Structures are given as C-alpha cells and as structure tokens.
Amino acid sequence: MDRKLTLYILIGMVLGVVVGQVLNQSVPADVIKADIAPWFKLLSDIFLNLIKMLVAPLVLSTIVVGIAHMGDSAALGRIGVRALAWFITASLVSIGLGLILVNFFQPGIGAPIPDASAAAAAVGEVKELKATEFILSIFPKNAVEALATNNILQILVFSIFAGVALSAIGERGKALVTGADALAEMMLQVTGYVMRYAPIAVFGALANVVAASGLAILGTYLTLLTEFYLSLVLLWIILLSAGAVFLGKRIWVLIRYIRQPLMIAFSTASSEAALPKLFEQLDRFGVPRRISGFMLPLGYSFNLDGSMMYMSFATLFIAQAYGIELSIGTQIMILLTLMISSKGIAAVPRASLVVITGTLAMFGLPVEGVAIILAIDQFLDMGRTATNVVGNAVATAVITKWEGMLEVEEPEIVDHPHAPAHTAADGRAGLELDPSNFEDGKG
C-alpha cells in the first residue's frame, strides 16, 4: 500500500501542475478565481481539515502514554535538554547558512520594487514581537481550548503534566493510560484512512496555485527560486550528514521512510499535514513512540530549519532589492532576532511573512518589500516546509540513537502500516538506557 500511495501522490503532483497550467493558459483569470480555484482549494482543504482533526488527540495520547511508561523521570529532562541543544544548533546553522548564501548570491539586486499597499493587504496587521508574550503563550490557560485550536505547544505542556501525574499515581491511573493507548492506536488507524485521500488533496493544492499564478511566474523569479532551493539542498546535506554521524548507514533508511511525509509537506506546503504520517514512518524506522511523541511536537515549535533559513534569506533579499547596505553587525543582530522570533510559529498562517515583516520594521527596513516575494511565496513555502520535516525527522532519530533507544526496523511490516504502532506507543519497557531492553525489538 505504501509504495502505491507514494506513486499516487507523485501522479497527483504531476496532474495538478499540468491541469493548473492548461487552465491558466486557456481560461480567463477572473473565471479561475471565481469559479474554478475554490473547487481545487476545496480538495486540499478537506484533507488539511482531516489532518487537523487528527493532530490534537494523536499528540495528546502519544505523549501521555509515553511519559506514563517512562518510569525514569530524569530521562524526560535529559531528552528535553539534548533536544533543545540540537534545535538551537540547527537553528543557528539554518539562519547562518541563509545569511552567508544570500550575501554570496545577492539575488535581490535588480528585483522589481512593488507598491506598499500590496504588502500591507497580504500580511495584515503586524504586532510587535515580544518575548514575554511568546513565553506566556506556551502555557495553556484552558486545556480544552488548546486541543480545540490545535495549539501544539500548549498541548505538549498539558500532556507532559498529565503524563507525569499519571506516572506518579501509578495503579490508580492505569485505566486512563490504557484509554490513551487505545486512543493513539485508533488515531493511527484513522491516519491510514485519511492518507488514502492524500493524492487527491495534492492534485487540488498544486492545480489551485498553478492555475492562479501559472508556471510563467517561476521564470520571473527564476534567480531567487534557484538560489533559494540550492541553499535548501545545502542545508539538507548538512542536516543529513550530521544525522549520519550518529546513525551511520541507517541515514539512508531514514530517508527512504520519510519520502511520503516529505511529498505531502512539499505539495501542500503544510508541516501539520505531514505530522501523522511522520509519526507512523518513524515508528517503522525504530523510534519508540514515547520519544517521537515528545520530540516532534517540540520540534514543530522550536526546530523549523527551512522556515528559519527562508526568513534570513528573504530579509536580506529585500534589503538588497532596495539597495540598502547592512553591516555584518546589523546582519548578525537580524539573525539573532529571527532566531528568537521564529519560535512557535508553526500553527500561524503566513507566519514566516509576519515574522519577516516585524523584523524589517524593527530594523528600519522597508516593510513593503514583502510584496516582492508574495507572488511566489507558495513555491518558496513548499521547499521550506519539506525542509522542516527533514530537520525534525533527523533530530528525532538522532536523539533516539543518542539515548540508546533506536530499535531495529522490521522490513516485514512494510505492507501493514499500523502493525508497529502498539509497540512504539506502548513503551512498557520504560526509558532506561540499557540497550539490552531493545535487543529483541521490544519498545
């Protein structure tokens, strides 16, 4: 089923581009916007809504069960410290690489200068970026509200408290742990059903954007697109090479397993859309669910490697377009500002543009420059979203290996996508560092 799904997604991508381009060339733009684009958008929006339906219960149940079965509370803190160390390092590498390459390529030289109204209309009101407000937003005032709004960071905080509490009360909480375990199993099964619709959603997403903009627009921004995607390729090489230091030859196995989440993220430009499938594929790779359940939600808030490279790239691109020379010191300050302000943006629509706009205003750069990249933001978003998935997959696998918890994948389960879920989510072996706990594949 998995190989067929990969093929169908690829077919959906190709058909979406072809159909979108034919419509763009043969149907008036106002007709496409009013009568055709909404139907294509509907196809992808149904899929995204179904995915959002899965995220909150899947993250909640996975983290609660994983922590409740850990047994060693110190392990949670150790994994958290190692994860944040990896995330901060990866963030600095991503933003720093973007900074270096945009200075080397200088894609903004000669870029068309737009009017201010286009940027203002697209981005909307830009609030001042305050660290105190972001820190406060991490802690939920209402757990039900956090679940209802799919606030992954708040769900993570609540789930950690719930999991630790269930672990502390022991036998009295067993019924709730069993229920959460069953909920995780059920959500994985539902994920399998939803993923069968993915090729149609991919078709609709790409047909919509190509019908509206046409492939000709890519030629107008060819320099920016080429240099940005080349930068992403270099970032992928760095991330995968760092992963190979820990994982060895198994890095190739990881790449093979994350193909589907990558294609879903790329074609829909939504990291959230790839999350349930990424959970499933990391199960197969040998990551216990109690680790991926903690790492991925944390990574979706603090480890957006593609988005961070994009923000540093785009900010300096705009400065170049307006002929503004920035000193190295100012560029480093911009880098550090983006490093802080980019955290927790995964669930915010057009969040990267909002952060870029706020950073431009903070440093006295022309905010209207955001309009330069609006026309191709969807195409840029596809690349940076796929990179976010790669970064989080590598980080999760590396931390698992670092903890001595990486299990041997089982090739015979490839045709049964939900078979390993119980083992991965269950975690009854605890989170000790003794590798002998996992020699027989028990999780």
Image (cartoon, rainbow, N blue to C red):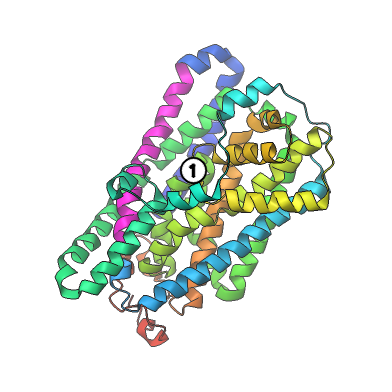
Quadrant of residue 74 within the rendered picture: bottom left
Check the image and report above or below for 25 versus 196: above
Dot 1, crowdedness within 10 Å: few (<14), some or many (≥20)? many
- Magenta segment: 35-64
Amino acid identity at mark 1: Ser
Q: Residue drawn at (38%, 87%), measured in percent from left and top? A: 436
Q: Nearer the viewer, residue 102 or 192?
A: 102
Query: Residue 352, position in %: x, y?
Result: 58, 41
Query: Residue 291, position in %: x, y?
Result: 40, 68
**Is 203 placed left or right of 313 in the picture?**
left
Check the image and report above or below for 95 versus 207: below
Q: Nearer the viewer, residue 26 or 127?
A: 127
Report which residue position mark 1 lands on: 270
Query: Residue 22, position in %: x, y?
Result: 57, 22
Majority secondary structure in the magenta region: helix
Quadrant of residue 196 within the rendered picture: top left
Q: Is residue 429 visible?
A: yes
Q: Is residue 37 magenta?
A: yes
Number of marks present in the image shown: 1
Q: Helix or strand or loop: what does disc 1 sit on? A: loop
Q: Is residue 115 magenta?
A: no
Q: Residue drawn at (43%, 72%), measured in percent from left and top? A: 77
Quadrant of residue 17 within the rendered picture: top right
Q: Nearer the viewer, residue 103 or 322?
A: 322
Check the image and report above or below for 34 versus 393: above
Query: Residue 403, position in %: x, y?
Result: 47, 78
Q: Is residue 192 visible?
A: no
Q: Looking at the rendering, in which quadrant would you find the C terminus?
A: bottom left
